[in-house]
Image: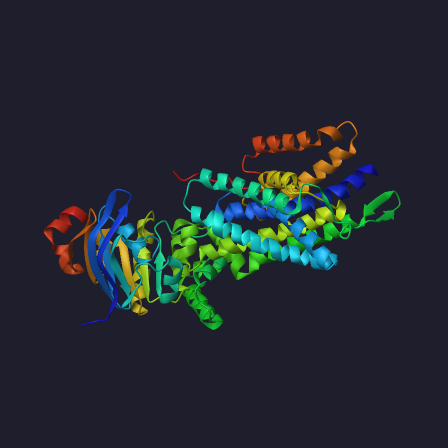
Amino acid sequence: MDFINALINGLSLGGTYAMIAIGYTMVYGIAKMLNFAHGDIIMVGGYAMYVTLLLVGQPIVALIAAIVFCVILGVCVERFAYKPLRGASPLAVLITAIGVSSLLQSLAQIAFGSAPKMLMAVQISGTVTLGSIHIAYYTILTLALTVVIMVAMTLFVKYSKPGRAMVAVSEDRDAARLMGINTNAIIAITFAIGSALAAVAGYCMLIKSPTLTNTLGAMPGIKAFTAAVIGGIGSIPGAMLGGIVLGVIEAISLSIPGLAPFTDAVEFGILIIILLVKPAGLLGKARREKV
Amino acid sequence: MSEVLLKVENLNVYYGMIHALKGISFEVNKGEIVSLIGANGAGKTTTLHTITGLIHPKEGRVLYKGEEITRTPAHKIVGMGMVHVPEGRRIFQGLSVYDNLLLGSYSRKDKNEIKENLEKVFVQFPRLAERRTQLAGTLSGGEQQMLAMGRALLSSPELIVLDEPSMGLSPLLVGEVFEIVKSFREAGKTVLLVEQNAKKAMSISDRAYVLENGVITMSGDSRELAEDERVRKAYLGA
């Protein structure tokens, strides 16, 4: 039954990766940039929760405060760091994103110090036992949030006016402008949604393990980026699938004693294999570059 | 004297060091089909991109219904009643025919108006109605052009700017596309048409301008211009 336990843990871990990966992939599809500061939004959301908990003490209020704060931060980062570089070389934008990442980490360190903060109030303990299968409450909550977010995102993109506009902008920005779509507004909405999802992902991480440091988002950010690439960067269903695949692989690898220490190597090795077989990712479309 | 819908004054556009448009001026009156003809690289597409706000000129003005729109961003111009059907159709391949049409109505708020426009487009282009749930990328070239034009109609335009609508189509479809352009005028709309197929373009337009290396060299009544010896030699292959 270890395998089933690992699978369930993997689905919930994968759900967290998927939430982060959706932000990566949407920003890539619509603004055509890799936002390497995306993982750090998770960390900032964590500190927003920490401060709210000190003031109010209610985990749910803390989560809402984190979402609001992250949305504002994400939109501001886009407005002041990335928007001035619209049309600049991709390398300049990439370096700026790395700069924003290190800026956020440093600011958090200045504001809150290097010692980890423990968010015991958000931690959720306890398990449900079904025969030999043990499922933690935080796993159930994460899975539920993942399903809600995936369904909501799918409906939003398919049936809402801004959702359709997002697809149009990601396919052809100039043609979208000719339809009357304000592409700057759509890019801002994209950053807002991505940041909100990052805040939720941060919550899912902290209910499991409540240790908060200024590098909380670094590794999950890289894993989620890997997930987005596995799924096919630019594709929202791809990010969902890539996140789940990566999370399940990670959990299963961790459950096998001989393999556990090499889990990161296993994950990135699978990324390499998938890219060798399907260079555009599992659900990505092979695009011809315009010359 | 008919009402001037679009007026372009002394447009100068640069791409880096390249002076692409060298002070061109022209106008389009309400209810006309005006064609802009010229060789590859003469500046036809650049002219259209400047008019609909995709690029901004260094000098000169664009006036639509008397209002200056020279620096108005592209996404605001559609809502004013001028729509641009770009070269190469630029439909959203990964979206359904229906979603493409809905995106055409993005600038419209009135639900009833959108519904009416949709019905009109489906009557005019029955193929689009048949294929409404199909992904736009799976349509044939001719159908994609119909979709691009139908999508433009969803914005309730007064002035339709068409860039090479017949490009890459079979002769039969070329004829059909020009019939559609004529139908726009019959429906009371105004058309600014850029075409490689100068002969066809001049046969359906009221007036024409000839663009050469970023300068308008000739202009006038399409029928008279089509008789001009230089135009015949250079553009009509006679």
Q: Residue B213: x, y in percent?
A: 20, 46
- What x and y, as percent, mark residue A207? 75, 49
Image coords of residue A43 (percent x, y) = 64, 46
Residue situated in front as seen by the camera: A257 or B106: A257
- Residue A17 quadrant: top right
- Compared to residue B92, the image places residue B184 above or below, namely below
The C terminus of chain A - image quarter:
top left
Q: Is residue B175 visible?
A: no
Q: Nearer the viewer, residue A239 or B228?
A: A239
Residue A151 shown left or right of residue A186 in the figure: right
- Residue B192 visible here: yes
Which residue, as the protein is rendered here, is positioned at the far left?
B229
| The N terminus of chain A lies in quadrant | top right
Q: Nearer the viewer, residue A271 or B183?
A: A271
Q: Is residue A7 left or right of residue A166?
A: right
Seen from the viewer's position, the closer of residues B55 and A173 is: B55
- The residue most toward the right is A131
In the displayed structure image, the side of residue A262 where residue A177 appears, left or right: left
How is colour applied across the structure in the image? Answer: rainbow
Image position, residue A23 (x, y; %): 58, 48
